[in-house]
């Protein structure tokens, strides 16, 4: 009986830890703030599966003492928990604007240099909001890092989070909804 209770307690603890990790997957100590913004608070269709499904324009201000930037966009309200829509890193730290329609390929040279990972649709690059029902909240987080990351293109957000641990200088986020 004691062994059974211990196993249940361990399983509950692991579930709680997994939830905490998905909510705040990168350990950040004393990170400064970056100002991140999109030109809207509700995604226009062109940035979603109902339109062109192109990446949105992202403004980034206030980056200091960093070598590179990373971006992760997530849906907080997906039916099965957090859902990743975009993973990108090794963006030069002096970038203040990421234009719309970043190519959906692993290594991007123009209009902004970056490496892209695999989203939860199973694709490399950006795939926009496509909620099955209701209004969802989408968070774009930008991390400034004190290094360049040596990751293969196409890795998951979890792999990126692990690589960023201990290297985050600043963080900023912006939330928009759809529909």
Image: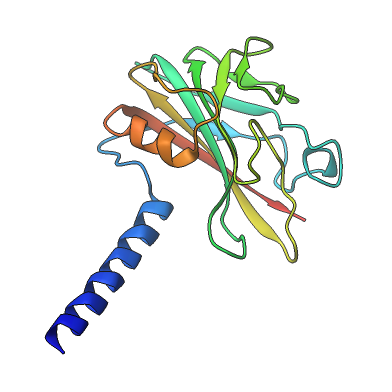
Q: Position of residue 47 (x, y in %)?
A: 78, 38
Q: Position of residue 138 (x, y in %)?
A: 62, 49
Judge by depth and name the residue closer to the eye, 96 or 16.
Answer: 16
From this view, report whether residue 156 is shown above or below residue 168. Answer: below
Q: Residue at x 73, y 66 (%)?
A: 134
From this view, report whether residue 4 is shown above or below residue 50. Answer: below
Q: Residue at x 72, y 42 (%)?
A: 128
* Quadrant position of the N terminus in the picture: bottom left
Tally of numbered discs: 0
Q: Image quarter for residue 88? A: top right
* Quadrant position of the C terminus in the picture: bottom right
Q: Image quarter for residue 124? A: top right
Q: Position of residue 155 (x, y in %)?
A: 50, 32
Q: Image quarter for residue 103? A: top right
From this view, report whether residue 14 is shown above or below residue 3. Answer: above
The residue most toward the right is 51
Residue 46 lies left or right of residue 108; in this view the side is right
The residue most toward the bottom is 1
Residue 80 lies left or right of residue 24; in this view the side is right
Q: Position of residue 147 (x, y in %)?
A: 34, 17
Q: Residue at x 15, y 81 (%)?
A: 3
Q: Which scheme is used to colour this image of the protein?
A: rainbow
From this view, report whether residue 155 is shown above or below residue 99. Answer: below
Q: Residue at x 61, y 60 (%)?
A: 78
């Amino acid at each position: 009986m004691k062994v059974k209770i211990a196993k249940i307690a361990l399983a509950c603890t692991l579930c709680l830890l997994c939830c905490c990790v998905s909510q705040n997957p990168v350990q950040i100590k004393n990170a400064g703030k970056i100002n991140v913004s999109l030109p809207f608070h509700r995604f226009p269709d062109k940035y979603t599966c109902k339109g062109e499904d192109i990446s949105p324009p992202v403004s980034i201000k206030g980056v200091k003492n960093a070598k590179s930037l990373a971006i992760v966009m997530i849906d907080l309200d997906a039916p099965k928990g957090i859902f990743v829509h975009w993973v990108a890193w090794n963006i030069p730290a002096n970038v203040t604007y990421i234009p719309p329609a970043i190519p959906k390929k692993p290594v991007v040279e123009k209009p902004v240099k970056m490496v892209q990972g695999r989203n939860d649709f199973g694709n490399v690059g950006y795939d926009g909001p496509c909620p099955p029902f209701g209004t969802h909240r989408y968070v774009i987080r930008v991390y400034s890092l004190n290094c360049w990351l040596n990751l293969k293109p196409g890795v998951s957000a979890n792999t990126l989070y692990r690589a960023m641990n201990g290297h985050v200088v600043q963080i900023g986020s912006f939330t928009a909804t759809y529909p």
